[in-house]
Image: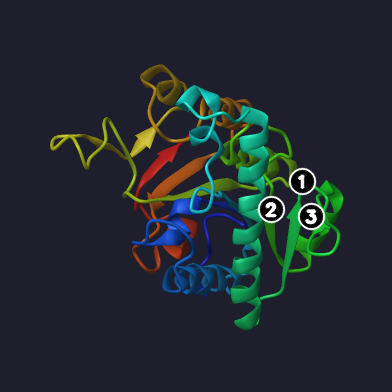
Amino acid sequence: MSTSAYKRIVLKLSGEALQGKSSHGIDHVVLVSIARQVKEIKDLAVDVAVVLGGGNIFRGQENTASRGLDMDRSVADYMGMLATVINGLALQNCLEKMGVPTRVMTAIEMQRIAEPYIRRRAIRHLEKGRVVIFVAGTGNPFFTTDTAAALRAVEVNADAILKATQVDGVYSADPKKVKNAKRFENLKYIDVLRKGLKVMDATAISLCMDNKLPIVVFNLHKEGNIKRAVMGEKIGTVVK
């Protein structure tokens, strides 16, 4: 068996990644593909935690008074956190049907469907070989699920954050809009902040920088890329 580059990772998935080509909701084909790839890296004896966004169901920042809608940012953010719980339960169900033991841990207590997030308990689940799915962000408004991923990764002593996106790395501009946009293979945290690159929000990048936590950004939609990222292959952009 090949040796993985990382022994414990946090996989960050956006809600939009789950919707596939649909305008909203969860695409079952995409969900199965993600679950299958997570199982692949579990078979390498890698500890896996997952942080999910909720943008395929509800995006807090796009439904506030700043966008002309009569909704407080706090309310919108809490609604977005609840959307991540729906995504987490869907991924849990799919993984367990493939024989992968999981635990969903939530920053907002809802005892009937998920465990409350407790750091020591989360680490114990990882040590026992369970995939831990972190939902409800940090439990606080005004913080993104990127920040939640960075926070949880630091708390559980992960070796890296694998950020699965719609493109194959970090570019100098949106490659779908700018033809000659440059793709970076390696970046420093401070360069991401100075250049305002769309990797993760500034809070998440700062947290990773303070704790020397690498971020690997890659294309989710190429089958097998999660395993390639775990193996340390050059498939996207590494921020460190």
Are there few (<14), some (14-19), or many (20+) residues within 10 Å of tag 2?
many
User: In this picture, is 87 found above or below 62?
Assistant: below
Residue on which disc 2 sits: 134
> In the rendered structure, are the residues bearing label 2 and label 3 in contact, judged by CB atoms less than 8 Å apart?
yes
Element assignment for label 3: helix
Amino acid on which the number 1 mark rests in the picture:
Ala
Percent position of residue 26, x then y: 49, 64
> In the rendered structure, are the residues bearing label 1 and label 2 in contact, judged by CB atoms less than 8 Å apart?
yes
The quadrant holding residue 121 is: bottom right
Is 208 displayed left or right of 110 in the figure? left
Element assignment for label 1: loop
N-terminal of the two: label 3 or label 1? 1
Distance between the alpha carbons at the discs numbered 1 and 2: 8 Å
| Residue drawn at point x = 62 percent, y = 25 percent | 210
User: Which residue occupies the foreground of this view, 22 or 162?
Assistant: 22
Residue on which disc 3 sits: 122
| Residue drawn at point x = 64 percent, y = 44 percent | 79
Residue on which disc 1 sits: 107
